Image (spheres, rainbow, N blue to C red):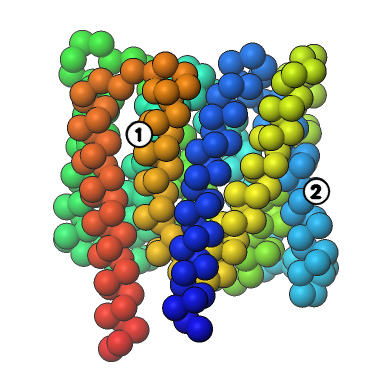
Amino acid sequence: MRIKSDRAGYLFALATYVIFATQDAISKHLGQSYSPVMVTMIRYWAFGAFAVVLAMRAPGGLKMAMTTTRPYLQVFRGVLLATQIVTAIFCFWLVGLAHSQAIFAATPLLVAALSVPVLGEHVGWRRWLAIGAGFVGVMFILKPDAGIFDPILLLAVLNAFMLAGYALATRLVARSDPPMTSFFYIGVVGAVAMSVVGPFAWEPMAPKDWGWMAALCCTGMVSHYCLIKALDHLDAVLVQPFSYLHLVIACFIGVLLFGEHLSANVWIGSLIVVGAGIFTVWREIRAKRMAANS
């Protein structure tokens, strides 16, 4: 039974990041023609409604999903994720889908480094070396010493820090709140937050693009549902390595569909970041297993 459960978890994790990459491509397509704030707002209307429906169908219903021991942190998570999505769409438009995801791939390393002061976790010297190597990889991607450094790339770096902050906040609330509560708050809070600012960025959308908008809403709902199911079967640390598949697919889509060009420094830096990230995750899995067996 445990093997079947793990297999289902891995399949859901695989589906999650394949769909994440697909929705990023749709976001880039729409973000090139419309305000990322408006695109995110419409996406969140569907996402928020989906979160409410799931909460109503979950054990304990809507009242249980709304019950949290850390309301301010849950609201902070919801606003932070919505802001991060807006920033990410700007990155896909200004920096490029593949280049942005190469920088975003450093997020797990940031989480590992910041987990020490924020979560009080222990990180051994091997993981610190991997984190350091990963940051060297990021510097390769940014290429700041070549005389052609683009300050726009700092927007992608900021986005990686926002993702890391969201991940750390999620770990904190997971200590006391169930997953459905966290899912409910990111959907509803994000929808409310975007509805406050989104109307100021409203612009008419061509009929053909409403189909793409519907596809974005659907991929957003399905991807988060798959992520919830993956986390039902697997620990978060086992799901994390699949995030690097996101980078691979994003590079493929960026080059094939959007005509993006990835220079050698991006390829080299991405390989270093991914290698360091996978090693960091492996060490965390190993540490947890040793702690469980002791």
Kind of element beneath mark 2: helix
* Left or right, residue 83 beside residue 151: right
Give the residue at mark 1: 102
Q: Residue furthest top?
A: 147
Res 135 → quadrant: top left
Q: Position of residue 217 (x, y in %)?
A: 70, 38
Q: In the image, residue 293 lies at what x, y percent?
A: 30, 87
Residue corresponding to mark 2 = 49
Q: Quadrant of residue 252?
A: top left
> Residue at 49% across / 47% down in the picture?
17
Taking the image as drawn, is residue 200 in sight? Answer: no
Residue at image point 70% right, 42% down: 218
Q: CA distance from mark 2 to mark 1?
A: 32 Å
Q: Is residue 63 above or below residue 13?
A: below
Q: Is residue 125 visible?
A: yes
Q: Amino acid at mark 1?
A: Ala
Q: Position of residue 154 (x, y in %)?
A: 39, 25
Percent x, y of residue 221: 68, 47
Near-viewer residue (216 or 92):
216
